[in-house]
Amino acid sequence: MAGTETKTVELTVPIMRGDTPVTAVTLTRPAVGALRGLNLLNILQMETGAMLALLPRITDLSPPEVEALHPHDWVNLCSGVTGFFAPPGAADQVEALLGGPD
């Protein structure tokens, strides 16, 4: 069912939630409602403002937790989000073009 696909991203620098370290974040494929008020092009370009608004909607992170992410983890999460918008089979096509494993 559309809207239920998830991806888990392991954090290289855990963030603290109280006394508990958060070491992984699960992204949920955004439904149209989660995109309300956002510019899709800005999301696909991983524009900071758009992602700051979207990530709390599709993860269990609060806005302050999103803002506290290490830049490496930020890029990994944003890349995971943009991957939800790729057409089916796109990863296989890219691998074939780049001469990936058979």
Image: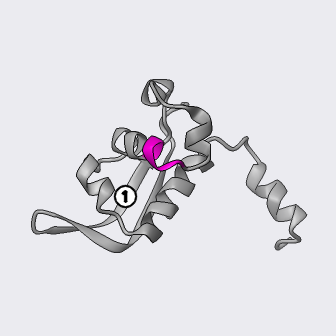
Q: Looking at this view, is 39 or 96 the one in front?
A: 39
What residue is drawn where x is 34% and y is 75%? Answer: 13
In which quadrant of the rendered view does residue 84 lie? top right
**In the rendered image, the vertical position of residue 95 relative to residue 62, given as above or below:** below
In which quadrant of the rendered view does residue 101 lie? bottom right
Query: Which amino acid lies under the numbered mark 1 shown in the image of this protein?
Result: Val
List x then y, in percent, for residue 58.
39, 41
**In the rendered image, the vertical position of residue 66 relative to residue 34, given as above or below:** below
Q: Is residue 92 left or right of residue 82?
A: right
**Residue to which mark 1 is pinned:** 25
List x then y, in percent, for residue 10.
42, 68
The rendered magenta stretch, by its main secondary structure, is classed as helix
Q: In the rendered structure, does residue 49 fall within the stretch colored magenta? A: yes
List x then y, in percent, for residue 26.
40, 53
Say few, some or many: other residues with alpha carbon within 10 Å of mark 1 (under 14 / 14 to 19 / 20 or more).
some
Q: Looking at this view, is 21 or 92 the one in front?
A: 21
**In the rendered image, the vertical position of residue 77 relative to residue 38, given as above or below:** below
Q: Secondary structure at mark 1?
A: strand
Q: Looking at this view, is 8 or 59 the one in front?
A: 59
**In the rendered image, the vertical position of residue 26 relative to residue 95, given as above or below:** above
Q: Looking at this view, is 96 or 75 the one in front?
A: 75
Residue span colored magenta = 47-51
Q: Is residue 22 left or right of residue 97?
A: left
